[in-house]
Image: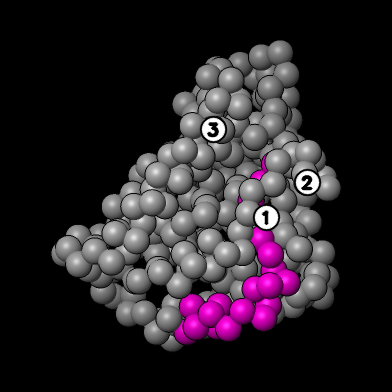
Amino acid sequence: MLERLMNHLMKQQWARLVALPVLLGCSSLSLAAEPDWTLYQQLLGQHLSQRSASESTQGIALTWLDYSALKSDPRFDQLLQQLANFPVASLEGRDQQLAFYINSYNILAISLVRQHWPLKSIKDATPWYQSVWKLEAGQLDNTAISLDKLEHQILRSMSEPRIHFAIVCASLSCPDLLAEPYLAQTLDQQLDDQAQRFIANPAKGVRWEKGSVQLSKIFDWFEDDFGGEDGVAEWVSRYSDKTVQSVAGFLDYNWSVNGS
């Protein structure tokens, strides 16, 4: 069942990738205010790959980023400049804002790792007594911003729990980095796919044990965003083929970097 679900999600993702150049180049009014994510798509296409649990050194199926190659790829600096210069006020509506800030979070998390590469964890980008999340990660609208502000003050304030399946803190236990930019036109389906993919991964999403489950710490940290304990159970049940009867506990969170 899990293998069929993962294959189905991968087919959906690659179908979107085929159509992505059309969406990125679309001049319709509904997409006119969104950034041109072509450069981001090119970088993902070249430096992001799939790794099965058997291929991963820690037994976790995930998307794997080549930080070593990104370190010397000048296009990433161009992407950061484009992101900094984009006029955020031109975004039209909630979906455009959500897509923009999710992409921004993921790009700036990658940037933090890239700046300090090589490292074993994104947390190694700062000394133990400083929080990497509060570090200046880059600029949006030509203003310095941290991952903490992006996540807690901007994204979480938009009342969309599925962001927690989409933003990636460059760690093995995080949701997989999507192999395409988030776009307003496809956002709802992309977030649904991410939720299914994450919950279906027993190494970091949900592990079933005879009716009870062990959940990602994400469901513990952000329980209120999912509507409390009952809400968490409803979300997990919604995106799986089983019903949560009881939560046995939470999986250990692996902060090792999601690439090499």
Spatial separation of the CA atoms under disc 2 and disc 1: 9 Å
The amino acid type found where label 1 is placed reads Trp
User: Disc 2 marks which amino acid?
Assistant: Ser
Name the residue located 54 percent from the left edge and 63 percent from the top edge.
44
Q: How many neighbours does mark 1 have within 10 angstroms: few (below 14), some (14-19), or many (20 or more)?
A: many
Q: Which residue is mark 3?
A: 7
Q: Are marks 2 and 1 in contact (CB under 8 Å)?
A: yes
Determine the CA span between mark 2 and mark 3: 18 Å
Q: Which of the two residues, 203 or 134, is positioned nearer the viewer here?
A: 203
Left or right: 122, with 154 as reference point:
right
Q: Nearer the viewer, residue 98 or 61?
A: 61
**Which residue type carries mark 3?**
Asn
Residue stretch rendered in magenta on the structure: 61-81
Residue depicted at x 60% and y 25%: 2
26 horizontally vs 153: left or right: left
Say which residue label 1 marks: 64
Q: Circle 2 is placed at which residue position?
A: 56
Q: Which mark is residue 42?
A: none
Badge 1 element: strand
Q: Earlier in the sequence, mark 1 or mark 3?
A: 3
Q: CA distance from mark 1 to mark 3?
A: 18 Å
Give how far across and how far down residue 40 sits, in percent.
Answer: 48, 68
Quadrant where the C terminus sits is: bottom right
- When asked about the image quadrant of residue 168, the answer is bottom right
Badges 1 and 3: C-beta atoms under 8 Å apart? Answer: no
Q: How is the image coloured?
A: one colour
Q: Nearer the viewer, residue 51 or 238?
A: 51
Q: Is residue 169 left or right of residue 11?
A: right
